[in-house]
Amino acid sequence: PDGSMDSLALGCCTAAFIILFLPLSASDDRLVPGKPLALGNTIVSDDGVFALGFFNPSNSTPAKLYLGIWYNNIPELTVVWVANRETPITNSSSYALMLSLTNALNLIILEGNNGGRVLWTTANVTTSPAGSSTPTAVLLNSGNLVIRSSNGSTVWQSFDHQTDTLLPGMKIRIKYNTGGTGDRLASWKGPGDPSPGRFSYGVDSDTPLEAFLWDGGIVVSRSSPWTGYHVKSFKQQQLEVAMNGSDVIMYVSFVDNGDEIYATYSLSNGAPPVSGTNPNLQVPRRLRAIKQGGVD
């Protein structure tokens, strides 16, 4: 009996030791300080639509790894946001990659969990008040990755750092306090290379009520200027016909709040996921409805 008790006690101690030293990992839809996201793991939005993690778009060897957000319920990898699109991670020690949230309200990619080399950071200058509760980084159902301070305010969000995809709720804008610079989406350079390509889409400070598509520095397409009335181009009419078949209603808003002027869009309830996207990643992006299991 004593031997059995000793064995049981030893087994319990061993299990406790193993659990104590298991690496902490992210859970559900968020990160908190001290619980990093490791390579091979993901965090998933509460509704299961979006996932955040590391990916290798070209399946190259050695791997070129990026931190990104993609549709979680589509078999084909469909990326909507890339953090380090111009600085892929190619180090042979990539197996030790960690995405961590610091108490200083920054997301950082580290080689290893403790004191490793910083490979990417959000470079947020906001700090959390001393003695405050734990900050969080949450992947929202909209596909927006947000850093929230202990009082719940958003101090950084991926929607402010667009790459090549315009999701519902994202803004294309001009900020007046930054000298009138406008937001631009930039296509991927190639199917396996998310670095900025030749095509871009956005607004120009000289004509803030129009959207432009550029091939390099050359304007190849532009929207009708917003005058308070909706004027449909032929391409917009084609899009409307395509979307009517899927019972999707798109609401477009133009807002000038004194600090910025922007356009954004939202969808009717029950609509399938929609984004401004580019199947070939090298041609001008256009809207398409993305449904579970395939692309229309």
Image: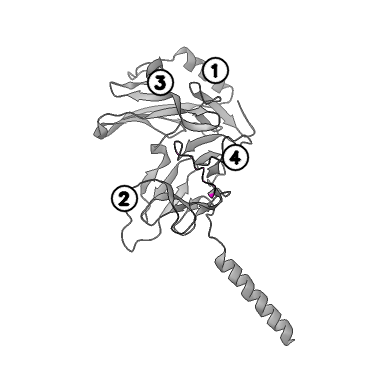
Distance Cα–Cα, label 2 vs label 3? 35 Å
Q: Residue 66 carries which label?
A: none
| Magenta-highlighted residues | 86-93
Q: Of tags 2 and 4, which is closer to the observer?
A: 4
Compare residues 291 and 189 and report the one nearer the observer.
189
Quadrant (top left, top right, bottom left, bottom right) of the C terminus: top right
Q: What residue does disc 1 label?
A: 241
Give the main secondary structure of the magenta stretch. loop
Q: What residue type is labelled 4?
A: Thr
Which residue is disc 4 drawn over?
Answer: 61
Q: For the view shown, which residue lies furthest in the top direction?
A: 234
Point out the tag, 2 or 4, that comes first from the N-terminus: 4
Image depth: mark 1 or mark 4 in front: 4
Q: Which of marks 3 and 1 is nearer the N terminus?
A: 3
Label 2 secondary element: loop
Task: Read off the residue under disc 3.
Answer: 216
Which numbered mark, 3 or 1, is in the foreground of this view?
3
Q: Which residue is outermost to the right?
A: 1
User: Which of the two marks, 1 or 2, is nearer to us in this view?
Assistant: 2
Residue 258 visible within the image: no
Give yes or no for residue 56 being in the magenta stretch: no
Mark found first going from the N terminus, 1 or 4: 4
Q: In this view, does 282 lie to the left or right of 207?
A: right
Residue to which mark 2 is pinned: 126
Q: Residue at x 64, y 75 (%)?
A: 12
- Residue 108 pos. (x, y %): 43, 50
Q: Are marks 2 and 4 in contact (CB under 8 Å)?
A: no
- In the rendered view, would you say 209 is above or below 167? above
Above or below residue 188? Residue 1 is: below
